[in-house]
Image: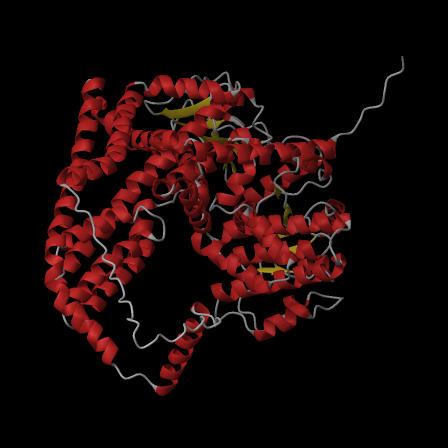
Amino acid sequence: MPDLPPVKLTTNNARFTGFVTFASFVLAMAVMKIGEEVLIPIALTILLTFLLTPFVVRLTRWGMPKAVAILTTVTIAAAILAGVAFFIVNQVASLMTELPNYEVNIRLKIARIKTQPDPDSVTRFSDLLNKVRRDIENPTVEPPPVAPPKSEGQKQAKPVAVEVTHRATSRAEALQALLGSLVRPIGTAIVVAVFVITMLFQREDLRDRFIKVISSGKLNLATEALDDAAQRVTRYLLMQLTVNICYGIPIGLGLYLIGIPHALLWGVVATLLRFIPFLGPWIAAVFPVVLAAAVEPGWAKMFYVLGIFVLMEIVTPNFIEPWLYGKGTGISNLALLIAAVFWTWLWGTPGLFLSTPLTVCIMVLGKYVPGLRFISVLLGSEPVLEPSARFYQRMLSMDSDEMAEIAHDYIEARSLDEFYDAVFVPALLMSERDRHSGSLAEVRQRFIFDASRELIDSLERDTFPKSRGKGDEDENASASASAPASLTDDERTATPIVFGMPARDDADEVVALMLQHLLRVRGIETEVVPVTVHPEDSVQWIKQHDIQVAFISALPPAALLGTRQLCRRIREGCPNVKLLVGVWDREMNFEDIKARLRRPTPDAIVAHLSDAVRQIERLVHESAASKSDPQIAVANKAAEASAQDGSEAYCPPLNLRDREPGEYFDVVSRDLAQRFSVPLSLISISATDKGFWKNFSSHEADVTNVNAEEPQFIAPPHSTDELYVVEDITKDKNLSSYNPLTERGIRFYGTVPLRNKLGRVVGNITVVDTKPRDIGTEGKHLLDQRAAELMAAVESAIAEAR
């Protein structure tokens, strides 16, 4: 029997999946609505367990037995709740007895309002509304039939009076009604208390069973989801309680100073009602505002009370909550408002109080369950698009103002280097991919290039407000076809020492302008040739001026061919100029790029602007040193010749085992380990002194099983001629399958090359950690600085020994 062709069910499967999701949602709502009386106590139990668990854990860590810690925590919590409830009931009962004393003030206010003369227009409009209302309520009907007139002798019947009487309620009936209204809350409280104690005793066992049910074999994912939900809910409850206390105390104190009766009661009510999202504070404000209007004939106290609540609603969200929370529950404000309405409709008043914690749990569920990922996207407060994707979307929308706003916000929160590297360049890379695939319209292409140049120029003017003006913009816009127009500016005060060229098109030029900005910030005068200038004209200009370093900016996917041609032209025309190539895509295979640029080979190849800045600083320093020291110049020429021949440049041995320069290695390795709080810091000199290495390990280090026979652990699996930092090696394609690191449980990896005065790499400094971390731009600069200091100390000590 012949094989049947496969049947495609993609569309039907998608529809079926959508139907199942919708049906599951409807079924879940129906179950929650029907089982309200059972599910509400369970939800309260879980939330109270989350709230009390940290206190139980803390008491057990202090040496208290688990049973005693649980009973102590529950007893204290119950005593606090009972005390608050007794205080509120007592204060409310006292207030009820005082309310008749304010009847005179209330009547006076009502009388004053009634006696206020209304304008004629308002009066006429009010009369019109009353007339319309009467006509609607009493429509015109046929008059009733007229009774025949009575004779003179007939007596008219008198109307019968109707008397309405109310049966007096006995004390027993009143007590029975009161107890009946309290039975359900008291029963719920008892059930919740029993459940809380039980769940605290069996917390670990319940957690294991829950993970077994939902994990589907993925224990790591289920554990992470459960921990995330518990952390978010516990943090919300504790922080919200703290915020509410900081909110209620000033209100109670302010009401006391104003002279509002039972001010402490209103402070406690404000603290409790603020658990209700958005509406709680204003519900709490109604009672003291009305009471302020009743306690005095005037209106001053009422406005004072209202002003206190408005002031606290301004101060608390903008100052107290950011200070205490640091980060919120991860739910957007709109989602919280919709959740409050939904849970109130579903479960009434208990649902209003439980809306935020329950929504947090649902959002965490959507975060870790692939089929429910849309819930996390809809409810979450975190941006669903990466900063680079958001920036590219503003480019596609041709919204230059939004582009500038994103840029300034990101730079204010991070740095200019990170904005260019993590946002701007990736956004341009997306546009280039769309452009080369034919999916980007011409009008959007031109806007992206023009707006990008304007934004970089604006950021540079912010950095150097007096160094650039309108003339520079006009000059950059009109580049000559024969020579770089921006290079002939007679008004420039500094002579450029770094020269940049785009490899092929406008996108390459835009990234080159970013690098120019970063170099100028560091005091390195740089010029970038426009893309319209012919490469031969650029090479001729380099020959005529004292250019120390040239760089080529290449943004994939179609720039490598032009890069290789430019490298050949510069090497042939300017052999003494240091050359750097920037291929601005961190996802590309560097070994492949180096192989394609091997003839001729540039002095450095980088993928990040921050790395390009560091490499150009090094190349500038080497170029200046070679001009001042003839021996270095000769050594560099010999090294360049050997590199052209394909042989390895010679590096003289340092003989560090025989004459180690003091304690420099120990000091540097210890300092880096402590600065970055990492368990292990290593220094290796492998290019000249085989097998020489030093390490510093903290007492918590689990990665110290290295020895001199394993240099592959110390050196990264690719070239060490540049700083290389990986925040999480499990997400890095170069290191995720590198066994010398993964077998030791290493997650963070950073290495910086050690260069001698000839500029040759002789070793490296490496820091590792068993958990991911972000050392930022300052950390990278610190690694570079320590590497330079170490090699300077080593070479100085060796020179003195000689």
Where 205 falls versus 656 (above or below)?
above
Please, which residue is most extreme toward the top here?
1
Q: Image quadrant of residue 476?
A: bottom right
User: Which residue is depicted at the point 12% across and 45% down?
Assistant: 90
Residue 213, how many percent across, how many down?
A: 48, 19
Q: Using the image as rendered, state which of residue 786 and residue 11 is in the foreground.
A: 11
Residue 400 visible within the image: yes
* Point 67% across, 30% down: residue: 647
**Residue found 55% across the figure and 73% down from its top:** 469
Image location (x, y in percent) of residue 294: 17, 65
| Relative to 591, residue 118 above or below | below
> Which residue is depicted at the point 24% across and 26% down?
56
Q: Quadrant of residue 255?
A: bottom left
Q: Quadrant of the N terminus?
A: top right
- Depth check, front residue: 648 or 277: 277
Q: Could you tell me residue 358's position as x and y percent?
A: 40, 37
Residue furthest out toward the bottom: 120
Instruction: Name the quadrant of the C terminus.
Output: top left
Quick one: 777 or 100, which is closer to the camera? 100
In the rendered view, does 731 fall on the left or right side of 18? Answer: left
In the displayed structure, does residue 444 sit left or right of residue 121? right
Residue 548 seen: no
Name the outermost residue toward the right: 2
